[in-house]
Image (cartoon, grey):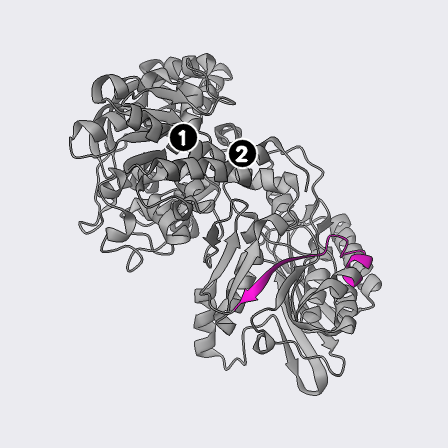
Amino acid sequence: MSSTIIDRFRDPRLAQRILDRIKGYGVEIKLMEVCGTHTMAIGRFGLRKLLPPEIDLLSGPGCPVCVTPTSVIDSVLSLKGVRVATFGDLLRVPGRGGTLEMARGRGLDVRVVYSPFDALKMAREKETVFIGVGFETTAPGVAATIITAREEGIKNFSVLSAFKLIPPAIDALLASGKSRIEGFILPGHVSTIIGSRPYQFLPERYRIGGVIAGFEPVDILEAIRDLIDQKMSNRPRIKIGYRRSVRPEGNERAKELMNRVFTVEDSLWRGLGWIKRSGLTLRDEYAQFDASRRYQLLPPSIDDDPNCRCGDVLRGLIKPPSCPLFGRSCTPDHPIGPCMVSSEGSCAAYYHYE
Amino acid sequence: MHQLLDEFKKVFDLPGLEDAHEIEDRIALTADSFVVKPIFFPGGDIGRLAVTGTINDLAMKGAIPRYLMITYIIEEGFPIDDLVKISESAQKIADEVGIKIVGGDTKVVEKGKGDGIYITTFGVGIIPDGISLSTDRIEPGDRIVINGPIGDHGVAIINAREGFGLATDLKSDCAPLSQLVQEMLKVGGVKFMRDPTRGGVATILNEVYQETGYGIIIVEEELPIRPEVRGACELLGIDPLYVANEGKVIAFTKGDPGDIIRVMRQNRYGGGSCCIGRVEEDLDGVYLKTRIGSLRPLIMLSADPLPRIC
């Protein structure tokens, strides 16, 4: 089939050349890919098997479904007489009262959408709540939807905001002091919005480097190579490897939309606990579109199986197979922990690909 | 779905779980139901799909499709014009293949109790003498052949259904394969065939692995996937190897499939035929050999893939 720009980043000869250089270094290094899409790409392209054993890749907290507290699902299940619009990933996430998919079977009006604007369209027919889950990547689009709702006077629409921010989570991982991470493969999509500057604390405060990477094999391998090079020269820095999408200042318009609608607050992360200034909530001017205020939903809480070690997986302390539930009672069919639910979760990625 | 089938096996005394079954005197039977949404989609409609699907289930057993019965469950208020259109496209496919629609049933359910229209079919075909297709015959070294691009139907449907407006002329591959299959069987060397509908190519290969115990490797570079299908799948975070097809056959052939592929390419539904992989002796599971040379496991997925958030 015809060749596309993507094919350059899947070029086997180029990938092999980078791999050879990585092997040539012979340096042991522990790296974390923060983003779930990277975790999936590493699995999908079989990179772990191509890399030498001294390269240790850990999966980070960048899977939106994985870090969303169970109580968000239960809050949604408590809603009566409204239509619930959600991205598909959330459909099978279990809360205490079951999943949205099961609730749909019992008659809750649950619709899968691909864009928050589709949820806004639905609100013209029936009161609709959109479940706002994700990171800086998804938040601007939802902000734009809320602004549109206000401009067009649509009163039937609200958003349950569980949006989270990536840089504070990375900071929290390192601040705990337990992590042995020596470099970060930073998320390409989140960074397209926020740029490279919010990561400057990594080299400045922790002397750890990061490469913002795209999602093709050549992107990821080159990021790994660069991080080894940074370690060897002892010059940690933030580099943009994903130049076809990311600028240092990010996307100003998207950031402006996000700031107009949302304000930063402390946020509860499944597996990681409360992290200061790591979540987004609707500003008072937009309170009418805030589902948690509109329906007086309970504040988030976590109610996970004590045997589930997703928290340690998300912090990069263990790999999925070290969890006693992995592949036994916890599988993609019957997920117990959040990392198994989402297709981008590190447990699901290990289950499928490793 | 596989879990549901296990429940049925406990209740019914089933000889197997194949889509079509051979009863006495080389007669093949099949039954199928169609609930596709939207009812009209790029490249077909539920009527075309119903007849095609039934024909293909028979064809995969090596049968020549002969008779078909078709049952409609119609929701009150469904437009008569649409019903006529659906029936006409069903008849058109029947004419093309030479299968006779000999009867059926019509039921109307209350408004709100159906989704426009559902169709159930029942088909009968005759298996020519000397044809025996079974996973029992598969052995290491066998090649795996497909008759064209993967994933067109599933992506065309999801694009039409969800209306996320991917600008594309992509159509469903929905097509009756019985003539193509008969031409392939005449060449010889075909051991087993399946149509990779729901669950896609990866699911069929996993079923074959489970039945034979032989591993399978397919080669990413050889896979025919249209750029627009590849692009849409990447956007949605799904794998085209798990996406449904409605006009594809996967055949396991003995040795070099060159002759079979040449014949397939002459058929209107086989222009893109190619070899995508082979059966391996000492290997557990189904694997994709990626462009960069790694082996990625393709496991059995039990639920439909969910589109991702970001």
Instruction: Tell me which numbered mark, 1 or 2, is placed earlier along the sequence.
Output: 2
Q: Position of residue A214 (x, y in %)?
A: 46, 30
Reply above or below: A204 against A5. Answer: above
Split into 4 quadrants, where in the image is the C terminus of chain B? top left
Subunit bearing disc 2: A
Foreground: A320 or B159?
A: A320
Mark 1 residue type = Ala
Q: Furthest residue to the left?
A: A177
Q: Is residue A165 left or right of residue A253?
A: left
Subunit bearing disc 1: A
**Disc 1 target residue:** A223
Q: Which mark is residue A9?
A: 2
Foreground: B35 or B146?
A: B146
Foreground: A293 or B288?
A: B288
Quarter residue B54 falls in: bottom right
Crowding near the residue tagged with mark 2, few <14, some 14–19, many ≥20 C-alpha atoms within 10 Å? some
Mark 2 residue type = Phe
Q: Is residue B121 magenta?
A: no
Asked whether disc 1 touches disc 2, contact meaning CB atoms under 8 Å apart, the reply is no
Reply above or below: A200 against A291. Answer: above
Q: Position of residue A82 (x, y in %)?
A: 41, 37
Q: Secondary structure at mark 1?
A: helix
The segment highlighted magenta reads B263-280
Crowding near the residue tagged with mark 1, few <14, some 14–19, many ≥20 C-alpha atoms within 10 Å? many
Q: Is residue A262 left or right of residue B99?
A: left
The structure residue drawn at horizontal position 25% and vertical position 44%, both measured from the top left corner, is A310
Q: Furthest residue to the front?
A: A24
Q: Position of residue A23 (x, y in %)?
A: 38, 40
Quarter residue B231 falls in: top right
